Amino acid sequence: MNGSKQLLYLSAVTEALTGLVALVSPSLLAWLLFGLPLTIGGELLGRLAGCALIALAIGCWPPEDVREERAPLRGLFAYNVLAAVLLLVIAVRTPFGGVLLWPAVLFHGTLSVLFFLAWRKKRSASVLSRF
């Protein structure tokens, strides 16, 4: 199994599990990330976000054909950059922070770099294969 496919599996499984936790208990996830409880509206929105994370995981599950791996790499790169930036802003600019906030910032930041490198490698290989 190649490195980008392993990265896709890791990210898809992580997002699916996080989505499942958000779907079942959004308050637990909010407490672990931000150290805050959720309102009823936050609970409902958290469950919706859980559904979105599960859908993201399904959409980015590695394809069988190696040539089709670039689309999920781009999608998960964008998601991880946005998640890392949002969580970093929350960590730095607000008084909120649970035990998993900084690890989540580091996790998504690291995945952003890895997905960028994997996407760039696939893109270079695709360009070279045309010649």
Image (spheres, grey):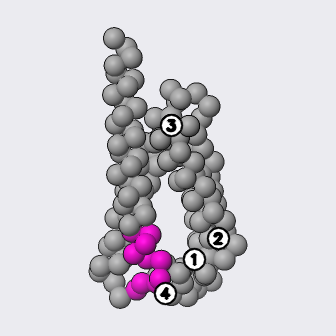
- CA gap, disc 1 and disc 2: 7 Å
Q: Which residue in the protein does label 2 denote?
A: 21
Q: Residue furthest left?
A: 93
**Which comes sooner in the sequence, label 4 or label 1?**
1
The amino acid pointed to by label 1 is Leu
- CA gap, disc 3 and disc 1: 32 Å
**Above/below status of 44 relative to 112:** below
Q: In the rendered view, does 44 fall on the left or right side of 4?
A: right
The amino acid pointed to by label 4 is Gly
Near-viewer residue (6 or 29): 6
User: Which residue lies at the image location 51% right of the left edge and 37% below the top edge?
Assistant: 2
User: Can you see residue 78?
Assistant: no
Number of numbered markers:
4
**Which comes sooner in the sequence, label 1 or label 2?**
2
- CA gap, disc 3 and disc 4: 38 Å
Splitting the image into 4 quarters, where does residue 59 fall? top right
Q: Which residue in the protein does label 3 denote?
A: 2
**Helix, strand or loop for disc 3:** loop
**Above/below status of 31 relative to 71:** below
**Which comes sooner in the sequence, label 2 or label 4?**
2
Highlighted range, magenta: 96-105
Q: Residues within 10 Å of mark 3 (few under 14, many from 20)?
A: few
In front: label 3 or label 4 = 3
Quadrant position of the N terminus in the picture: top right
Q: Which residue in the protein does label 4 denote?
A: 35
